[in-house]
Structures are given as C-alpha cells and as structure tokens.
Amino acid sequence: MKILIVAMSNSIHTARWISQISDQGWDIYLFPTDIFVGIHEKINKINICSPGILKFLIRKYKEKGKSKSPGKIENLETLLYQNNHNLNYKDIIKRFLPDNRLKKLVRTIKNINPDIIHSMHVQEAGYLTLEAKKKIKDRFPDWIVTNWGSEISLFRHIQGQEEKIKDVLAECDYFSSECKRDMKIVKGMGFKGRFLPVIPNSAGLDFEIVNNIKQPGPTSKRRNIMLKGYQNWAGRALVGLRAIERCSDIIKDYNIMIYCAYTIDIIIAAELFTKRTGIKTEIIPLNTKHEDILRYHGEARISIGLSITDAISTSLLEAMVMGSFPIQSNTSCGDEWFKNNDTGILVHPEDAEEIEKAIRKAIKDNRMVDEAAIKNYSILYKRLEKEKIKSEIINNYKRIISD
C-alpha cells in the first residue's frame, strides 16, 4: 500500500499519527505543506517528498558565505529571525521565493501514484490537495481529509473560507474528525462521502507511560492548578488567569503552573498575578518533554484550557487520564469525553466569572474531583488505549483499499 500524507511536517500530531502506521511495511510518503519548517524529530521510517526549502537555502548560503543575490537572502533572513513575531509568511513567499508547492505536489502524486492521499488539516493540506486534483486529469487516488481543531467549527464562518471548505468536501472521498460535532457540520455543508470513525489527531495514549508516572493518592490532595498558556487569536489564557485571581481567597496554598506560554503577555501577567496575590506561579519551559507535561497534569487538582475554538484538545485528554479535573472551553467537544458538571466542566472561554465559579466548585468539592479522576481514566482507557487506536487506524486504511 502506498499512502501520501500531506500535512504540517513539524507537527507532533503528524508525527504521532505516522508512528501508528510506520511499522506496517507500507510505502508512506510525507509532503510538507509549509516550506518554512523542518521535519519533526519523531518522524522517521518514511519518505519525505519536499524539504524545508527556505531553511535549506539559508543554511546553504551561510555555509558558502556568498549568494547570487545576497541582498535578498540577507533581507529574508532578517525578516525571519529578527521580526518573526510580525511575519506574514505568504507575503514573504511572494516577495522572495516562488510558491512551487502545487507543482511539486502534482509531480509527486504522478510519480508515486499512491493508493491513498491523506490531507491532514483542511486549510493547509486540504486546499493544496484540492488544487492538485484539479490539475491532474487522470483518476485521482482515494482522498481522506482530516479536520484539525478549529478549522471546521470556526473558519466556516470566516469570509471566503466557507466556499473553499465546501469545495474540499465536495471532492474528497473520506472525512475524519476528532468530534462527532464536526461530522454533523460537514454533512450540513454538503459532504456526500464516507465518514471514518472519530479518533483524536494525536492518536492513542500510552497507558504504560501514564501508569509509570501517575502520582498515587486522591486528586483532592493535590495543590497545583495547570493553565494552558495559549494567548493568541484563539487562546484565552489571560481570561483564565483573571478567573484564577478571582479565586485567590481559597487557593492561597496552591501553585499555578502555566505551560505552552509562547507570548510575553501571559508571562508578564503571571508575574503581576503573583505580586498581587502572593500565590506562586511557574512558567513551564517550552522545551519541556511530553512525559514531564503529563507528570505536571498528574500533580494538578485542576487543568484549565481556554480557546474561542477547538476540537478535542490533546491537553484535555492528557489532564483527564492523569487525574486532573478538566475545566475546558465550551467551544471544544469536551462534552463528548466527559460529563459536564460531573467529570469536567465546560465554560465560556471569555467569561472570567463563569470560569471562576467552575474553579471554586472544583476546589471545594473533593468528592467530585476524586470520582472524576477514576471515571475519566476508565473512559479513556476504553476509548484511547494506544494499541486499540493503532489497530483502528490501520484497519481504516485497509478498508479504504478494499472498497
């Protein structure tokens, strides 16, 4: 079997998915959707169809110490490494380098002649694959489109995106999603193909690792609160920190652990929070290993994740399996994994008062958080055990080939 995966090559989700099938003896190819990034270190045993062209060029010219057009390369490097917080990648591509991804993808499909093309992420991989299909006159391989995160639930409302999404859905053969919610949405958008079973994009959980690092004892004895530090166009970590501060009267003996804090505003806000309340905050380094993040969840009474749009957040599942009580934005499909106000609480991502109430409930109700930890672990073991998910993923590909 030949499978061509079109996806973000630096994504841990891509790496984890590929790891589920890389030992099957299949010919697996990865076509990166972004020329600016490299290949995730955990992606191996497969064929890479297109290198990270931009980094390759910069490295090449650095090594040689010269360039046919040094001004352009130097300016481009300055933009990339000194002003990357304001980058508009599409403008840079148009200005300095031709965007040859479509031509390369068409050539790759013709050369490889895969049995299956799997586009992971609608806006990136889906749109690109659709354009390739329009260029190829011969029979196109079976095409799977996987929705990542917010792109169906949110971007269908964004001007210019709805029709593009509909075009992809009209042309692909199979659709997979992390949420039953999104399956209903795409059906309403005219999808006529076949649905694959709902599976998180991060694939299964390794319960051997979970059990080795999980802390003994009830969740109610823990004195840490985990906060996902995303503060950007979608993430609302600052709202979460504000809600935590409103609870400062009952969490004086707690520590606030903030992870995935990519922007300076949440880091500054955390320091000011500590000065105002006397409650300790810790910014978990961005390069912290995955197992250590799991361990932090395993030491937390509550794990909070807030975003104006989401699918099933991987961090939510990791919190649940490690026994931390989840408070998650209601824009996710968390209610497909936990029972609201019982084994988790859904909140509006921009309502600090509502989030405060959820935190207070989780702090005061020892029985709720202890019982939730037991129930959530059991549910995730039944639904997300690594080998179970791996078998399901492999069988899905086999069924597509046999159809």
Image (cartoon, grey):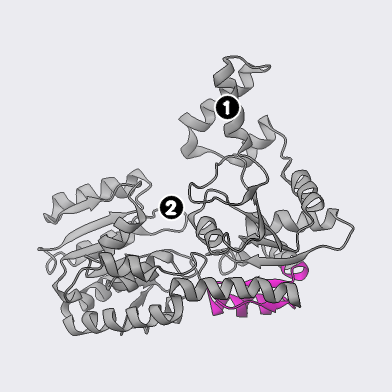
| Extreme residue in the front direction | 25
Q: Quadrant of the C terminus?
A: bottom right
| Extreme residue in the top direction | 66
Numbered disc 2: secondary structure: loop
Is label 2 in contact with label 1 (beta carbons under 8 Å)?
A: no
Q: Residue at x 54, y 27 (%)?
A: 77
Crowding at dot 2, Cα within 10 Å, few <14 / some 14-19 / many 20+, comes out as: some
Question: Which mark is drawn over residue 58?
Answer: 1
Residue 39: x and y, percent? 54, 45
Foreground pick, 234 / 174: 174
Residue on which disc 2 sits: 232
Q: CA distance from mark 2 to mark 1?
A: 29 Å
Look at the picture and state if 33 lies above or below 100.
below
Q: Quadrant of the N terminus?
A: bottom right
Q: Residue at x 37, y 46 (%)?
A: 263
Q: Residue at x 55, y 42 (%)?
A: 37
